[in-house]
Amino acid sequence: MNNKTYLPRLVDKQVKMELETFGAVCIEGAKWCGKTWTSKHHSKSAIYLGDPSRNFQNKELMKLEPKTALQGEVPRLIDEWQEVPSVWDIVRHEVDERGKKGQFILTGSSTPIQKGILHSGAGRISTIRMRPMSLFESKDSSGDVSLQSLFDGTFEAKATPEVDLQTLINLTIRGGWPGSLGLNYEQYSLIPKEYISSVINHDIYRLEGINRNSKKMHRLLRSLARNESTTASIPTLRRDIVEYDNDELDNDTISTYLTIFERLFLIDNQMAFSTNIRSSTRIKQYAKRHFVDPSLAIAVLGANNNDLLNDLNTFGFMFEALCERDLRIYAESLGGELYHYQDYKNREIDAIVQLEDGRWGAFEIKLGADAIADAAKSLINIRDALEAEGAKTPDVLAVICGLSNFAYQREDGVYVVPINALRP
Protein backbone atom coordinates (compact mmCIF):
# COMPACT_ATOMS: atom_id res chain seq x y z
CA MET A 1 0.00 0.00 0.00
CA ASN A 2 1.03 3.64 -0.36
CA ASN A 3 2.35 4.67 3.07
CA LYS A 4 2.15 8.33 2.05
CA THR A 5 -1.65 8.17 2.13
CA TYR A 6 -1.87 6.27 5.43
CA LEU A 7 -3.02 8.33 8.40
CA PRO A 8 -1.19 6.88 11.44
CA ARG A 9 -3.24 5.33 14.23
CA LEU A 10 -2.39 5.07 17.91
CA VAL A 11 -2.76 1.30 17.68
CA ASP A 12 0.14 1.06 15.19
CA LYS A 13 2.74 0.81 17.96
CA GLN A 14 0.90 -2.07 19.61
CA VAL A 15 0.46 -3.92 16.30
CA LYS A 16 4.19 -3.65 15.57
CA MET A 17 5.18 -4.82 19.05
CA GLU A 18 2.79 -7.78 19.08
CA LEU A 19 3.86 -8.93 15.61
CA GLU A 20 7.37 -9.16 17.04
CA THR A 21 6.04 -11.14 20.02
CA PHE A 22 3.37 -13.51 18.67
CA GLY A 23 2.92 -15.72 15.65
CA ALA A 24 -0.30 -13.93 14.69
CA VAL A 25 -2.24 -10.81 15.64
CA CYS A 26 -6.03 -10.44 15.47
CA ILE A 27 -7.27 -6.85 15.11
CA GLU A 28 -10.97 -6.68 15.92
CA GLY A 29 -13.48 -3.87 16.21
CA ALA A 30 -16.38 -2.10 14.54
CA LYS A 31 -16.53 -2.22 10.77
CA TRP A 32 -15.36 0.92 8.96
CA CYS A 33 -13.10 1.92 11.87
CA GLY A 34 -9.95 1.37 9.78
CA LYS A 35 -8.88 -2.19 10.68
CA THR A 36 -8.17 -3.28 7.10
CA TRP A 37 -6.31 -0.09 6.23
CA THR A 38 -4.13 -0.37 9.35
CA SER A 39 -3.55 -4.09 8.78
CA LYS A 40 -2.52 -3.46 5.16
CA HIS A 41 -0.04 -0.91 6.49
CA HIS A 42 1.63 -3.66 8.55
CA SER A 43 1.27 -6.60 6.12
CA LYS A 44 3.08 -7.69 2.96
CA SER A 45 0.38 -9.85 1.34
CA ALA A 46 -3.34 -10.35 1.83
CA ILE A 47 -6.42 -12.47 1.24
CA TYR A 48 -9.88 -10.88 1.62
CA LEU A 49 -12.51 -13.38 2.74
CA GLY A 50 -15.36 -10.88 2.41
CA ASP A 51 -14.53 -10.14 -1.23
CA PRO A 52 -17.66 -11.05 -3.30
CA SER A 53 -15.76 -11.35 -6.59
CA ARG A 54 -16.02 -14.68 -8.40
CA ASN A 55 -18.74 -15.83 -6.04
CA PHE A 56 -16.61 -15.36 -2.90
CA GLN A 57 -13.75 -17.40 -4.34
CA ASN A 58 -11.35 -16.48 -1.53
CA LYS A 59 -13.76 -17.75 1.09
CA GLU A 60 -14.15 -21.07 -0.72
CA LEU A 61 -10.38 -21.36 -1.16
CA MET A 62 -9.87 -20.92 2.57
CA LYS A 63 -12.44 -23.63 3.30
CA LEU A 64 -11.15 -26.14 0.73
CA GLU A 65 -7.42 -25.40 0.50
CA PRO A 66 -6.40 -23.49 3.63
CA LYS A 67 -2.69 -24.21 3.14
CA THR A 68 -2.83 -22.52 -0.26
CA ALA A 69 -4.78 -19.54 1.11
CA LEU A 70 -2.17 -18.99 3.82
CA GLN A 71 0.73 -18.86 1.38
CA GLY A 72 2.20 -15.42 0.75
CA GLU A 73 4.77 -12.98 2.00
CA VAL A 74 4.48 -12.41 5.74
CA PRO A 75 2.92 -10.82 7.65
CA ARG A 76 -0.06 -12.08 5.61
CA LEU A 77 -3.37 -10.31 6.15
CA ILE A 78 -6.52 -12.45 6.42
CA ASP A 79 -9.29 -9.88 6.26
CA GLU A 80 -12.72 -10.58 7.85
CA TRP A 81 -11.61 -13.95 9.18
CA GLN A 82 -14.99 -14.50 10.86
CA GLU A 83 -16.43 -15.30 7.43
CA VAL A 84 -14.70 -18.68 7.87
CA PRO A 85 -14.56 -19.20 11.65
CA SER A 86 -12.30 -22.25 11.31
CA VAL A 87 -9.55 -19.81 10.24
CA TRP A 88 -8.80 -19.22 13.92
CA ASP A 89 -7.67 -22.81 14.46
CA ILE A 90 -6.11 -23.08 11.00
CA VAL A 91 -3.89 -20.07 11.74
CA ARG A 92 -3.10 -21.29 15.24
CA HIS A 93 -1.95 -24.63 13.82
CA GLU A 94 0.08 -22.99 11.04
CA VAL A 95 1.82 -20.74 13.58
CA ASP A 96 2.78 -23.85 15.56
CA GLU A 97 4.06 -25.51 12.41
CA ARG A 98 6.20 -22.54 11.32
CA GLY A 99 7.48 -21.63 14.77
CA LYS A 100 8.04 -17.99 13.77
CA LYS A 101 6.75 -14.60 14.90
CA GLY A 102 4.69 -12.14 12.88
CA GLN A 103 3.22 -14.58 10.37
CA PHE A 104 -0.41 -13.41 10.12
CA ILE A 105 -2.69 -10.48 10.78
CA LEU A 106 -6.38 -11.32 11.14
CA THR A 107 -9.11 -8.68 11.09
CA GLY A 108 -12.67 -9.17 12.30
CA SER A 109 -15.73 -6.93 12.59
CA SER A 110 -17.73 -9.46 14.59
CA THR A 111 -16.99 -12.23 17.05
CA PRO A 112 -18.12 -15.72 15.99
CA ILE A 113 -19.53 -17.96 18.69
CA GLN A 114 -17.04 -20.61 17.56
CA LYS A 115 -13.98 -18.49 18.39
CA GLY A 116 -11.69 -20.38 20.71
CA ILE A 117 -13.88 -23.47 21.11
CA LEU A 118 -11.14 -25.77 19.79
CA HIS A 119 -8.22 -23.68 20.98
CA SER A 120 -7.98 -20.23 22.49
CA GLY A 121 -4.86 -19.31 20.55
CA ALA A 122 -3.16 -18.28 23.80
CA GLY A 123 0.52 -17.67 23.22
CA ARG A 124 0.08 -17.83 19.44
CA ILE A 125 -2.57 -15.24 18.53
CA SER A 126 -2.82 -11.93 20.37
CA THR A 127 -5.98 -9.82 20.14
CA ILE A 128 -6.01 -6.05 19.71
CA ARG A 129 -9.21 -4.01 19.98
CA MET A 130 -9.41 -1.13 17.50
CA ARG A 131 -11.92 1.71 17.69
CA PRO A 132 -12.94 4.64 15.48
CA MET A 133 -10.53 7.54 15.28
CA SER A 134 -9.97 9.88 18.20
CA LEU A 135 -9.83 13.62 17.51
CA PHE A 136 -6.05 13.44 17.77
CA GLU A 137 -5.85 10.72 15.11
CA SER A 138 -8.19 12.59 12.76
CA LYS A 139 -6.10 15.77 13.21
CA ASP A 140 -8.97 17.59 14.94
CA SER A 141 -7.04 17.82 18.22
CA SER A 142 -3.84 19.86 18.32
CA GLY A 143 -2.29 17.41 20.78
CA ASP A 144 -0.89 20.29 22.85
CA VAL A 145 -1.61 18.43 26.11
CA SER A 146 -0.74 14.81 26.78
CA LEU A 147 -2.79 12.63 29.10
CA GLN A 148 0.48 11.12 30.34
CA SER A 149 1.72 14.55 31.44
CA LEU A 150 -1.16 14.91 33.90
CA PHE A 151 0.05 11.80 35.71
CA ASP A 152 3.79 12.49 35.42
CA GLY A 153 3.75 16.10 36.57
CA THR A 154 5.16 17.39 33.28
CA PHE A 155 2.02 19.33 32.31
CA GLU A 156 2.55 22.86 31.00
CA ALA A 157 -0.21 25.45 30.74
CA LYS A 158 -0.77 26.76 27.23
CA ALA A 159 -3.25 28.43 24.93
CA THR A 160 -5.10 25.94 22.74
CA PRO A 161 -6.94 26.29 19.42
CA GLU A 162 -10.32 27.98 19.64
CA VAL A 163 -13.36 25.89 18.85
CA ASP A 164 -17.02 26.87 18.67
CA LEU A 165 -20.15 24.94 19.55
CA GLN A 166 -21.13 24.26 15.95
CA THR A 167 -17.73 22.71 15.25
CA LEU A 168 -18.03 20.40 18.26
CA ILE A 169 -21.50 19.35 17.15
CA ASN A 170 -20.31 18.64 13.61
CA LEU A 171 -17.31 16.64 14.84
CA THR A 172 -19.64 14.52 16.96
CA ILE A 173 -22.06 13.95 14.06
CA ARG A 174 -19.16 13.06 11.76
CA GLY A 175 -17.67 10.63 14.24
CA GLY A 176 -14.33 8.88 14.05
CA TRP A 177 -14.88 7.03 10.77
CA PRO A 178 -11.81 7.32 8.49
CA GLY A 179 -14.07 7.31 5.43
CA SER A 180 -15.75 10.51 6.64
CA LEU A 181 -12.61 12.61 6.68
CA GLY A 182 -12.59 15.30 4.03
CA LEU A 183 -16.31 15.02 3.30
CA ASN A 184 -18.82 17.84 3.73
CA TYR A 185 -21.66 17.76 6.26
CA GLU A 186 -24.26 16.44 3.83
CA GLN A 187 -21.95 13.53 2.96
CA TYR A 188 -20.48 12.53 6.33
CA SER A 189 -23.82 12.75 8.15
CA LEU A 190 -25.09 9.92 5.89
CA ILE A 191 -22.37 7.45 6.89
CA PRO A 192 -23.58 6.65 10.45
CA LYS A 193 -27.14 6.27 9.15
CA GLU A 194 -25.99 3.79 6.52
CA TYR A 195 -23.92 2.03 9.18
CA ILE A 196 -26.97 1.38 11.35
CA SER A 197 -29.05 0.27 8.36
CA SER A 198 -26.34 -2.16 7.27
CA VAL A 199 -26.03 -3.66 10.76
CA ILE A 200 -29.78 -4.16 11.17
CA ASN A 201 -30.56 -5.38 7.66
CA HIS A 202 -27.46 -7.41 6.81
CA ASP A 203 -24.79 -7.93 9.46
CA ILE A 204 -26.99 -9.46 12.14
CA TYR A 205 -28.29 -12.14 9.79
CA ARG A 206 -24.76 -12.87 8.51
CA LEU A 207 -23.57 -13.20 12.10
CA GLU A 208 -26.24 -15.65 13.20
CA GLY A 209 -28.13 -16.93 10.17
CA ILE A 210 -31.33 -16.06 12.07
CA ASN A 211 -33.98 -13.58 10.92
CA ARG A 212 -34.39 -11.27 13.90
CA ASN A 213 -37.18 -8.72 14.30
CA SER A 214 -35.49 -5.66 12.80
CA LYS A 215 -38.16 -3.24 14.08
CA LYS A 216 -37.69 -4.38 17.67
CA MET A 217 -33.91 -4.24 17.34
CA HIS A 218 -34.16 -0.71 16.00
CA ARG A 219 -36.38 0.28 18.94
CA LEU A 220 -33.77 -1.03 21.35
CA LEU A 221 -31.10 0.95 19.50
CA ARG A 222 -33.26 4.08 19.86
CA SER A 223 -33.57 3.42 23.57
CA LEU A 224 -29.80 3.01 23.85
CA ALA A 225 -29.37 6.28 21.98
CA ARG A 226 -31.80 8.08 24.32
CA ASN A 227 -29.78 6.66 27.22
CA GLU A 228 -26.34 7.34 25.75
CA SER A 229 -23.75 8.04 28.47
CA THR A 230 -26.06 6.86 31.27
CA THR A 231 -26.14 3.70 33.41
CA ALA A 232 -29.56 2.56 32.21
CA SER A 233 -30.37 -0.99 33.33
CA ILE A 234 -32.22 -3.53 31.19
CA PRO A 235 -35.51 -2.81 33.04
CA THR A 236 -34.91 0.91 32.40
CA LEU A 237 -34.43 0.26 28.69
CA ARG A 238 -37.59 -1.85 28.69
CA ARG A 239 -39.66 0.94 30.28
CA ASP A 240 -38.13 3.48 27.91
CA ILE A 241 -39.23 1.43 24.88
CA VAL A 242 -42.79 1.23 26.24
CA GLU A 243 -42.89 4.98 26.94
CA TYR A 244 -41.38 6.28 23.71
CA ASP A 245 -42.17 3.57 21.13
CA ASN A 246 -45.35 2.05 22.54
CA ASP A 247 -43.83 -1.40 22.22
CA GLU A 248 -42.58 -3.99 24.68
CA LEU A 249 -39.51 -6.22 24.75
CA ASP A 250 -38.99 -8.66 27.58
CA ASN A 251 -35.76 -8.65 29.56
CA ASP A 252 -34.44 -11.82 27.92
CA THR A 253 -34.96 -10.42 24.43
CA ILE A 254 -33.21 -7.16 25.34
CA SER A 255 -30.32 -9.13 26.84
CA THR A 256 -30.04 -11.26 23.69
CA TYR A 257 -30.05 -8.21 21.42
CA LEU A 258 -27.42 -6.46 23.55
CA THR A 259 -25.16 -9.49 23.25
CA ILE A 260 -25.54 -9.38 19.47
CA PHE A 261 -24.67 -5.67 19.43
CA GLU A 262 -21.59 -6.40 21.53
CA ARG A 263 -20.48 -9.19 19.19
CA LEU A 264 -20.77 -6.71 16.29
CA PHE A 265 -18.76 -4.13 18.29
CA LEU A 266 -21.69 -1.75 17.89
CA ILE A 267 -21.79 -0.88 21.59
CA ASP A 268 -18.77 -0.24 23.78
CA ASN A 269 -19.84 0.15 27.38
CA GLN A 270 -17.81 1.79 30.13
CA MET A 271 -17.43 -0.47 33.16
CA ALA A 272 -17.67 0.61 36.80
CA PHE A 273 -14.49 1.30 38.77
CA SER A 274 -14.10 0.03 42.29
CA THR A 275 -11.35 -2.53 42.65
CA ASN A 276 -8.57 -0.21 43.79
CA ILE A 277 -10.56 2.34 45.78
CA ARG A 278 -11.18 0.10 48.81
CA SER A 279 -13.92 2.44 50.05
CA SER A 280 -16.33 1.41 52.77
CA THR A 281 -19.14 2.88 50.66
CA ARG A 282 -21.01 0.43 48.46
CA ILE A 283 -20.12 0.95 44.80
CA LYS A 284 -22.65 0.65 41.99
CA GLN A 285 -21.64 -1.83 39.32
CA TYR A 286 -23.79 -0.66 36.40
CA ALA A 287 -21.96 -0.10 33.12
CA LYS A 288 -22.31 3.27 31.43
CA ARG A 289 -23.91 2.68 28.03
CA HIS A 290 -22.18 3.82 24.86
CA PHE A 291 -22.34 3.24 21.16
CA VAL A 292 -18.85 2.59 19.79
CA ASP A 293 -19.05 6.12 18.36
CA PRO A 294 -21.49 8.90 19.35
CA SER A 295 -22.28 9.56 15.69
CA LEU A 296 -24.26 6.30 15.71
CA ALA A 297 -26.44 7.41 18.62
CA ILE A 298 -27.15 10.68 16.84
CA ALA A 299 -28.00 8.83 13.62
CA VAL A 300 -30.40 6.48 15.43
CA LEU A 301 -32.17 9.49 16.95
CA GLY A 302 -32.42 11.10 13.52
CA ALA A 303 -30.91 14.33 14.86
CA ASN A 304 -29.10 16.90 12.74
CA ASN A 305 -26.80 19.76 13.71
CA ASN A 306 -29.68 22.21 14.22
CA ASP A 307 -31.53 19.73 16.45
CA LEU A 308 -28.48 19.37 18.68
CA LEU A 309 -27.80 23.10 18.67
CA ASN A 310 -31.33 23.66 19.98
CA ASP A 311 -31.17 20.78 22.49
CA LEU A 312 -27.93 21.20 24.42
CA ASN A 313 -29.08 18.75 27.06
CA THR A 314 -29.05 15.93 24.50
CA PHE A 315 -25.85 17.19 22.94
CA GLY A 316 -24.24 17.26 26.39
CA PHE A 317 -24.62 13.47 26.60
CA MET A 318 -23.25 13.05 23.07
CA PHE A 319 -20.31 15.33 23.85
CA GLU A 320 -19.59 13.27 26.96
CA ALA A 321 -19.59 10.16 24.79
CA LEU A 322 -17.17 11.82 22.36
CA CYS A 323 -14.77 12.67 25.19
CA GLU A 324 -15.03 9.22 26.73
CA ARG A 325 -14.40 7.61 23.34
CA ASP A 326 -11.16 9.59 23.09
CA LEU A 327 -10.15 9.04 26.71
CA ARG A 328 -10.58 5.29 26.22
CA ILE A 329 -8.39 5.31 23.09
CA TYR A 330 -5.71 7.42 24.79
CA ALA A 331 -5.77 5.38 28.00
CA GLU A 332 -5.47 2.09 26.12
CA SER A 333 -2.56 3.43 24.05
CA LEU A 334 -0.78 4.00 27.39
CA GLY A 335 -1.63 0.49 28.58
CA GLY A 336 -4.48 1.74 30.78
CA GLU A 337 -8.25 1.34 30.99
CA LEU A 338 -11.31 3.60 31.13
CA TYR A 339 -14.01 3.29 33.81
CA HIS A 340 -16.64 5.43 35.52
CA TYR A 341 -17.57 5.77 39.20
CA GLN A 342 -20.93 5.74 41.00
CA ASP A 343 -21.71 4.89 44.59
CA TYR A 344 -24.80 4.69 46.78
CA LYS A 345 -24.05 8.08 48.35
CA ASN A 346 -24.88 9.65 44.96
CA ARG A 347 -21.26 10.46 44.19
CA GLU A 348 -20.34 10.17 40.52
CA ILE A 349 -17.25 10.66 38.37
CA ASP A 350 -17.76 10.76 34.60
CA ALA A 351 -14.54 8.98 33.68
CA ILE A 352 -11.75 7.17 35.47
CA VAL A 353 -8.44 6.51 33.72
CA GLN A 354 -6.36 3.83 35.40
CA LEU A 355 -2.79 3.24 34.23
CA GLU A 356 -0.93 -0.07 34.26
CA ASP A 357 0.92 0.85 37.46
CA GLY A 358 -2.33 1.39 39.37
CA ARG A 359 -2.36 5.19 39.37
CA TRP A 360 -5.74 6.60 38.48
CA GLY A 361 -7.26 9.89 37.50
CA ALA A 362 -10.77 11.28 37.98
CA PHE A 363 -12.22 13.24 35.04
CA GLU A 364 -15.36 15.30 34.80
CA ILE A 365 -16.62 16.27 31.33
CA LYS A 366 -18.28 19.62 30.70
CA LEU A 367 -19.28 21.24 27.45
CA GLY A 368 -19.16 24.88 28.57
CA ALA A 369 -16.45 26.77 30.46
CA ASP A 370 -19.08 28.09 32.88
CA ALA A 371 -19.44 24.61 34.39
CA ILE A 372 -15.73 24.10 35.11
CA ALA A 373 -15.77 25.52 38.65
CA ASP A 374 -18.63 23.29 39.81
CA ALA A 375 -17.02 20.23 38.18
CA ALA A 376 -13.71 20.94 39.93
CA LYS A 377 -15.50 21.36 43.26
CA SER A 378 -17.28 18.04 42.79
CA LEU A 379 -14.00 16.24 42.10
CA ILE A 380 -12.36 17.73 45.18
CA ASN A 381 -15.33 16.84 47.38
CA ILE A 382 -15.25 13.21 46.21
CA ARG A 383 -11.49 12.99 46.70
CA ASP A 384 -11.75 14.40 50.24
CA ALA A 385 -14.63 12.05 51.09
CA LEU A 386 -12.70 9.02 49.86
CA GLU A 387 -9.67 10.12 51.85
CA ALA A 388 -11.80 10.49 55.00
CA GLU A 389 -13.03 6.93 54.49
CA GLY A 390 -9.47 5.64 54.24
CA ALA A 391 -9.92 4.82 50.57
CA LYS A 392 -7.35 5.19 47.80
CA THR A 393 -7.66 8.66 46.29
CA PRO A 394 -7.09 9.72 42.67
CA ASP A 395 -3.64 10.80 41.55
CA VAL A 396 -5.12 13.25 39.02
CA LEU A 397 -8.20 15.47 39.06
CA ALA A 398 -9.16 17.01 35.73
CA VAL A 399 -12.03 18.62 33.85
CA ILE A 400 -12.24 17.86 30.13
CA CYS A 401 -14.12 20.68 28.45
CA GLY A 402 -15.36 21.74 25.05
CA LEU A 403 -15.68 25.50 24.81
CA SER A 404 -12.35 26.66 26.20
CA ASN A 405 -9.14 27.81 24.56
CA PHE A 406 -6.69 27.36 27.42
CA ALA A 407 -5.23 24.32 29.21
CA TYR A 408 -4.19 25.09 32.78
CA GLN A 409 -4.06 23.90 36.37
CA ARG A 410 -6.33 25.67 38.81
CA GLU A 411 -5.11 26.84 42.22
CA ASP A 412 -6.95 23.91 43.81
CA GLY A 413 -4.86 21.50 41.71
CA VAL A 414 -7.55 20.50 39.23
CA TYR A 415 -6.42 20.43 35.59
CA VAL A 416 -8.60 21.91 32.86
CA VAL A 417 -8.01 20.53 29.37
CA PRO A 418 -10.00 21.19 26.16
CA ILE A 419 -10.79 17.96 24.32
CA ASN A 420 -9.51 19.48 21.07
CA ALA A 421 -6.03 19.78 22.62
CA LEU A 422 -5.70 16.32 24.18
CA ARG A 423 -3.51 13.38 23.13
CA PRO A 424 -2.22 10.24 24.90
Image: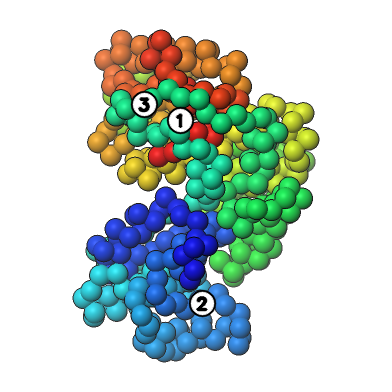
Q: Is residue 288 above or below residue 183?
A: above
Residue at mark 2: 49
Provide residue 351's location: percent of width, then percent of height: 45, 30
Residue depicted at 43% across the width and 14% down the height: 410
Q: Is residue 8 above or below residue 410?
A: below
**Whether residue 125 can be seen here:** no
Provide residue 297's location: percent of width, then percent of height: 65, 43
**Whether residue 64 can be seen here:** yes
Q: Residues within 10 Å of mark 2 (few under 14, many from 20)?
A: many
Provide residue 186's location: percent of width, then percent of height: 77, 50
How many marks the image carries: the answer is 3
Residue at mark 3: 155
Q: Residues within 10 Å of mark 1 (few under 14, many from 20)?
A: many
* The C terminus, quarter of image: top left
Residue depicted at 67% across the width and 30% down the height: 165
Residue at mark 1: 351
**First reached walking from the N terminus: tag 1 or tag 3:** 3
Q: Is residue 132 above or below residue 82?
A: above
